[in-house]
Image: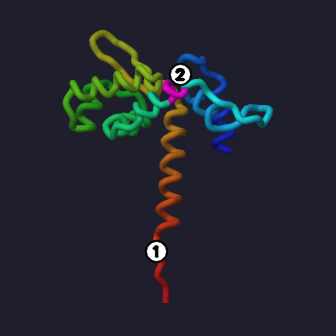
Amino acid sequence: MILERLTMNACKFDEEKNVFRLWFEAIFRDKTGMSQKQSLAALEKIARSFRALSEPTRLMLLQELKAGPKTVNELVELCGLSQANISKQLAVLRDEGFLHREQRGTTAIYSIGDPMVMELCKLMCDGMNRRAKERAIHFSI
């Protein structure tokens, strides 16, 4: 059900902004059921988006923004990192379309720009939890 929802949502976004659509097309089949290959350029865009999610600080920022929009100063306080580091990581996530930035005077407010990024994180965590449960040793008498 989640995969179906993600696939439907992926089709709604602009091709240049939504690398998830490219990723789903690369991994899954198209509507006719035929395997679909992506060009190297498309796969590079997909890989770049996954790299944006491969840094723990960026995942921490997404985790904090899941609760709602936050200013850079709020994120600095919540994460305990320097403003320069937070701003750099926010820029990476924003450049990939994962975050939205709103400027109010001198204050920048960040929010989740593409809700599918949280769905992707949930899928990853669910898979990790499933694998951990499968590897768990159960003892009983």
> Dot 2 lies on which element?
helix
Residue 105, relative to residue 79: is it above or below? above
* Residue at x 49% of width, y 85% of height: 140
Residue ID for mark 1: 137
* Residue at x 39% of width, y 16% of height: 102
Does the magenta run of residues contain 71?
Answer: no
Farthest-out residue, front:
40
Residue 72's quadrant in the figure?
top left
Whether residues under marks 1 and 2 lie with C-beta atoms below 8 angstroms apart, the answer is no
- Residues in magenta, as a range: 42-46
The colour scheme used to paint the residues is rainbow
Quadrant housing the N terminus: top right
* Residue at x 23% of width, y 34% of height: 77
Crowd class of label 1 (few under 14; some 14 to 19; many from 20; radius 10 Å): few
Farthest-out residue, bottom:
141
Left or right of 25 on screen, residue 20: left
> Dot 1 lies on which element?
loop
Left or right of 5 on screen, residue 53: left
Task: Where is residue 82? Give x, y as percent.
Answer: 19, 30
Task: Where is residue 36? Give x, y as percent.
Answer: 69, 31
Q: Which mark is residue 41?
A: 2
Camera-near label (1 vs 2) is 2
Does the magenta run of residues contain 45?
Answer: yes
Residue 15's quadrant in the figure?
top right
Distance from the alpha carbon under mark 1 to that under mark 2: 44 Å
As rendered, which of 48 and 76 lies closer to the eye? 48
As rendered, which of 122 and 33 lies closer to the eye? 33
Residue 79, relative to residue 102: is it above or below? below
Q: Main secondary structure of the magenta part?
A: helix
Task: Where is residue 80? Give x, y as percent.
Answer: 21, 38
Tell me which label, 1 or 2, sits earlier in the chain: 2
- Residue type at tag 1: Ile
